[in-house]
Image (spheres, rainbow, N blue to C red):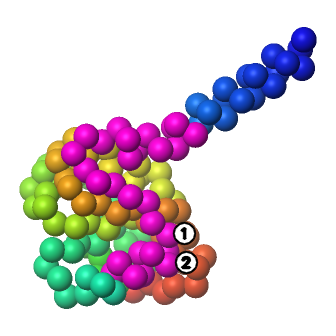
Amino acid sequence: MKHIIYTLASILSFISLSFLGTARVQGTTNAAIRQISPDEAEKLIRANAGSRDFVILDIRTPGEYRDGHIPGAALLDYYSLSFRSSLEALDKNRTYFVYCRSDNRTGRALKIMGDLGFTRVYELRGGIQAWLSSGRMLQVH
């Protein structure tokens, strides 16, 4: 009997975690938010090179940004007191590619973006760590 209870508890935990993993996409009401791999991100950046309707947002701290960022990325510090108001000021109809260090801040930022009505947002799955692990380079300031 204990074995059956443990098995059922494990299955329920797995199902719960599965739903939590997709909550950032499903929890947003107006946005089409999609996680993409470093390979997909590189293709997205190339396809939108020079487009004024495409914005790369690095939501790490200024120190993290200075240590290296994806070329063309604009800094919007998640921990800044003006983060939400800075997002509100952005054009909601542009396409945004958002990343942080490891994926933690982007989950919370994407919720805010969805609540604010952003329509096209891509998230770098695994953050800048995944970008570097895939052998890609950063621009240093």
Residue 54 percent across, percent down from the top left = 21, 74
Could you tell me which secondary element the residue under label 2 belongs to?
helix
**Residue drawn at the location 58% of the way across and 84% of the way down:** 135
Q: Secondary structure at mark 1?
A: helix
Q: Was residue 9 drawn as part of the magenta stretch in this picture? A: no
Q: Tell me whether circle 2 and circle 1 mark residues in contact (CB < 8 Å).
A: yes
Asked if the stretch drawn in magenta spans residue 33, the answer is yes
Examine the rendering and report whether any part of residue 9 can be seen. yes
Residues under labels 2 and 1: Cα distance? 5 Å
Q: Quadrant of residue 141?
A: bottom left
Across and down, in percent, residue 12 comes to 67, 26
Residue 101 percent coordinates (x, y):
47, 63
Instruction: Tell me what residue is drawn at x 51 percent, y 37 percent.
Output: 20
Residue type (three-letter) at the residue carrying disc 1? Gln
Amino acid at the residue labelled 2: Leu
Q: Main secondary structure of the magenta part?
A: helix
* Image point (37%, 72%), residue name: 65
Q: Nearer the viewer, residue 125 or 71?
A: 125
Relative height, residue 33 to residue 112 (above, below) = below
Name the residue carrying label 1: 129
Which of the numbered marks, if any, corresponds to residue 98?
none
Q: Which residues are magenta?
A: 18-45
Quarter occupied by residue 96: bottom left
Q: Left or right? Give the position of 123 relative to 89.
A: right
In this view, which residue lies farthest toward the top? 1
The tag on residue 132 is 2
